[in-house]
Amino acid sequence: MNLGISASDGAAVRFEKVQKSYDGDTLVVKDLNLDIAPGEFLTMLGPSGSGKTTCLMMLAGFEPATHGEIFLNDRPINDVPPYKRGIGMVFQNYALFPHMSVAENLAFPLELRKMDKSEQKAKVQRALDMVELGALGNRRPAQLSGGQQQRVAVARALVFDPELVLMDEPLGALDKQLREQMQYEIKHIHQSLGVTVVYVTHDQSEALTMSDRVAVFEDGRIQQLSRPDELYENPHNSFVAQFIGENNKLEGKVVSIDGTRCEVLVDDGTRLVSEAVNVSASGERTTLSLRPERIEFDPVDAMDNVVEGLIKEIIYLGDHLRIVMSVAGNEEFVVKVRNRGEKRPLAPGQTHRVGWAAGDCKALDAVA
């Protein structure tokens, strides 16, 4: 699948210079340009108020765009009402009709399309089988668990074979274990059907687990649009680095730049070598980003950066230890140490060295 498409490649969805304001003054979506490929699973990820849900509502037709145009299969849809867009929708609250059986809920969008009864029955059964609820068609929604209700909601969104399905925080009401299970189920359904999915969430683990690409929103703009691995490994700015996964940050000033590397003087006086990602000149303020799992605890071999730190807290998490330290002026510096069954006599108050490669440390824009 070509995920870096342009409009000429035939995007399933295209936002072209789209803006949205609710009060005529403040823009909650600012000049959005975004192409979504046919069959792609794209997640709009961001904190509350970042503009992601507004984008989904404009695509669904529930909110009008203030400026710009939205295209579905190269057809402008700004003036097309929601019920004529042919889009499947899945909401957090399921939105099932309580007085209807599961099968009747699924048949409802087919009846709206005036499909004959025999074809309705076949499509309903196929959709129920797809979400492993084939024997529960006669039950009412209230007789189902939360996870089963969410499966019905997914099946109803897919039963009429839409080319595009929108999902708005669909797993937010489920407990952690069920939520994780449903992530994989939705991902597998998407892979088997090849339908285009636009998914909205504030949960970064959902986004990383399920998506082909993730659009990280903040302040009405896409801060980064990348594959999940690229987003995590190579954040473009400090916001993305902090929002995606756990991250240690160290603030300082660029001393020198040599190609893709730079030397940074951290505010506590420590000198570190880093990859120059979002810095351009000596004297510039920067925030260093470093993932906890990329840090070597008590390194044996030589490394680009080795500093001493003071252990403040040790948390046992089964497969690894989460060690909170004071390092280079950061009092909440986290190191993840893999649990290999060793009996290290680690304790708060001890001083230990930590090290990391320059390529694992990203010099990004300074935090405002």
Image (cartoon, helix red, strand yellow):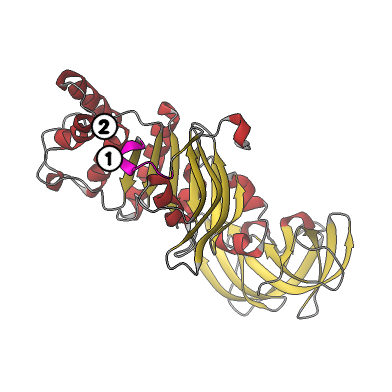
Residue 132, disc: 2
Whether residue 2 can be seen here: no
Disc 2 crowd rating (10 Å Cα; few below 14, some 14-19, many 20+) is some
Asked if residue 69 is positioned above or below residue 336 in the image, the reply reads above
Q: In the rendered picture of this protein, how many numbered marks are placed on residues? A: 2
Left or right placement of residue 177 versus residue 106 in this view? right
Q: Nearer the viewer, residue 12 or 139?
A: 12
Q: Please tell me whether residue 340 is drawn above or below residue 250 in the rendered image.
A: above
Quadrant containing the C terminus in the rendered view: bottom right
Label for residue 345?
A: none
What is the three-letter code of the residue carrying label 2?
Glu
Q: Position of residue 192 (x, y in %)?
A: 42, 27
Taking the image as shown, residue 290 lies to the left or right of residue 245, namely right
Magenta span: 78-85
- Please name which of the two marks, 1 or 2, marks the residue nearer to the observer: 1
Q: Amino acid at mark 1?
A: Arg
Q: Name the residue at 77% across, 54% down.
A: 359
x and y, in percent, of residue 242 in the image: 59, 64
Is 269 placed above or below 154 here?
Answer: below
Q: Secondary structure at mark 2?
A: loop
Label placed on residue 151: 1
Q: CA distance from mark 1 to mark 2?
A: 8 Å
Q: Earlier in the sequence, mark 1 or mark 2?
A: 2
Say if mark 1 contacts mark 2, CB within 8 Å: yes
Q: Nearer the viewer, residue 351 or 8?
A: 8
At 63% from the left edge and 36% from the top edge, which residue is drawn?
Answer: 6
Q: Does the stretch in magenta take in 82?
A: yes
